[in-house]
Image (cartoon, rainbow, N blue to C red):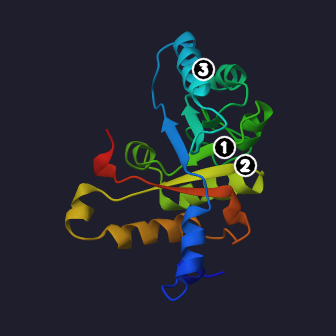
Amino acid sequence: ASASSFVVQPQNTRLADTFLFARKPFITGNWKLNPTTKKEAIELATGIANSVSDSSPGDVALFVPYPYLESVEAAVDGKVTIGAEFITAEESGAFTGGVSPLMLQSMGIEWALAGHSERRTLNGESDEEINKQCLMLIENGMNVVLCIGETLEEFEKGLVGSVCAIQLKKNLAGVTAEQMKQVTIAYEPVWAIG
């Protein structure tokens, strides 16, 4: 499938309406380097999980720091999805501090972020590395939330569409239309992140 197959065609507005509104919203929270204790992480996660009901308008996922993944996953008892904030695009080897998809799966984690702007800028993750992460997650049967977005400078130059299109093309290279079922795109302009 080509990129144009994902574009809603204006002459088919009934299909467009169905396509745009058929999916439940997916509400996510990335905890970054917070909170500071396991106890606080469990309290926060269970508080959120207990506020989500079967009649909630969307699905909820929390992307939490590695030390809390297993405890938080157990505490929420399936009421919300728990995911990792990033992965290492390697299965094993000399990658100090790295975490592979197989390690996550052994803890019951089936979701991970890839391409977050902080990982791109602060950790120097390239589009090629992000692509490897996406492919590795997908090939291991996991789901990925691919983060894309432009900087303030790119926004001010009117490059939003171009920047996002380039990120999508590079980050999803080799991903098939069928595998896109395992991918959620999260658009968050870098300049809007607080």
Q: Nearer the viewer, residue 181 or 120?
A: 181
Q: Which mark sits nearer the N-terminus, 3 or 1?
A: 3
Q: In the drawing, does residue 126 fall left or right of residue 191?
A: right
Instruction: Quickly name the residue at label 1.
Output: 111
The location of residue 60, given as percent across then percent down, is 58, 39
Q: Nearer the viewer, residue 161 or 92?
A: 161
Disc 3 to disc 2, C-alpha distance: 24 Å
Quarter containing the N terminus? bottom right
Q: Which dot marks residue 163?
A: none
Q: Which dot marks residue 142?
A: 2
**Label 2 CA crowd tier, 10 Å (few <14, some 14–19, many 20+):** many
Identify the residue at horizontal 67%, vertical 68% (top origin). 175
Reply above or below: 5 against 51.
below
Callouts 2 and 1 close, C-beta under 8 Å:
yes
Q: Which dot marks residue 46?
A: 3
Quick one: SS at disc 3?
helix
Q: Amino acid at mark 2?
A: Met
Q: Which mark sits nearer the N-terminus, 2 or 1?
A: 1
Q: In the drawing, does residue 13 fall left or right of residue 49?
A: left
